Amino acid sequence: MTGMTTKPLDVYVEVVATKAFASAVGWPGWCRAGRNEEAALAALAAYADRYAEVAHRAGLTFNPQAADTLVVVERAKGGSTTAFGAPECTHDGERLRLTPAPAKRLASLLAASWSLLDDTAAVTPASLRKGPRGGGRDRDKMLDHVLGAETAYARKLGVKHKQPALDDSAAIAALRADILAVIGSPTDGGPITETGWTTAYAARRIAWHVLDHVWEMRDRTE
């Protein structure tokens, strides 16, 4: 018998002078940064096993060994947001028409990211180990920060909510449901609002922010 071959992983990269982001195509939230493209790609590959948990929660088949061979299919010049530390560029592949099945897949991965955040927060202590320079938010401030970001991100999809309080589970669920309803709908690939985001980019950006803090919580738990 011949061994099974693993399909290479397609990757988007955006770069500025001091930072690069690598994002796995079709796997929203699997994005890592580095000081340059090489470092960002290495970080992305190193997080394959962590991202597998998200894919499995979404009910999707996922092979971490795909990260053994990365293929950059699109490069973009980043901007000030990239330099600050967030993926900024909407790649051409995120402007393509989405039929019902791929749209539903994006929504399922974002929902799985939120599920992982909730479960991680439930077992994370309120006080987290400080970073190497004494910085970093504790758990509740981190969760509040995520909700604030998502409230702003939602407006890029035409979804307008007030930022939910941390203890208002109904309001949080309503915000998430409205975001998922947009991301999970078929689209021609254009921005949802005149100055907004495409759903593919929105799924990647929102899931990246959620998972970045999930993994931070885990790494900083004493």
Image: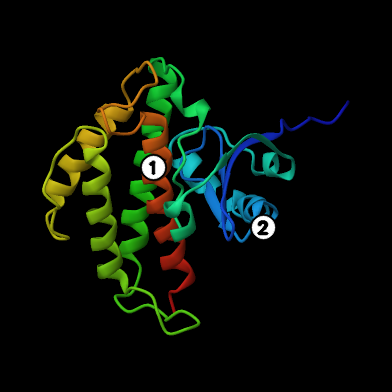
Nearer to us in this view, 203 or 53: 203
Asked whether the beta carbons under mark 1 and mark 2 sit within 8 Å of each other, the answer is no
Q: Residue at x 74, y 44 (%)?
A: 68
Q: Residue at x 37, y 52 (%)?
A: 210
Residue found farthest to the right: 1
Mark in front: 1 vs 2: 2
Q: Position of residue 173 (x, y in %)?
A: 19, 44
Q: Which residue is identified by label 2?
A: 39
Q: Give me the disc on residue 112.
A: 1
Q: Position of residue 137 (x, y in %)?
A: 33, 73
Total numbered circles: 2
Q: Quadrant of the N terminus?
A: top right
Nearer to us in this view, 21 or 25: 21
Q: Residue at x 56, y 56 (%)?
A: 33
The quarter of the picture where residue 166 lies is: bottom left
Q: Earlier in the sequence, mark 1 or mark 2?
A: 2
Looking at the image, residue 138 sits to the left or right of residue 54; the answer is left
SS assignment at label 1: helix
Q: Residue at x 27, y 53 (%)?
A: 149
Neighbours of disc 1 within 10 Å: few (<14), some (14-19), many (20+): many
Tell me the amino acid under the disc marked 2.
Ala
The quarter of the picture where residue 181 lies is: top left
Position of residue 18 relative to residue 64, above or below, is: below
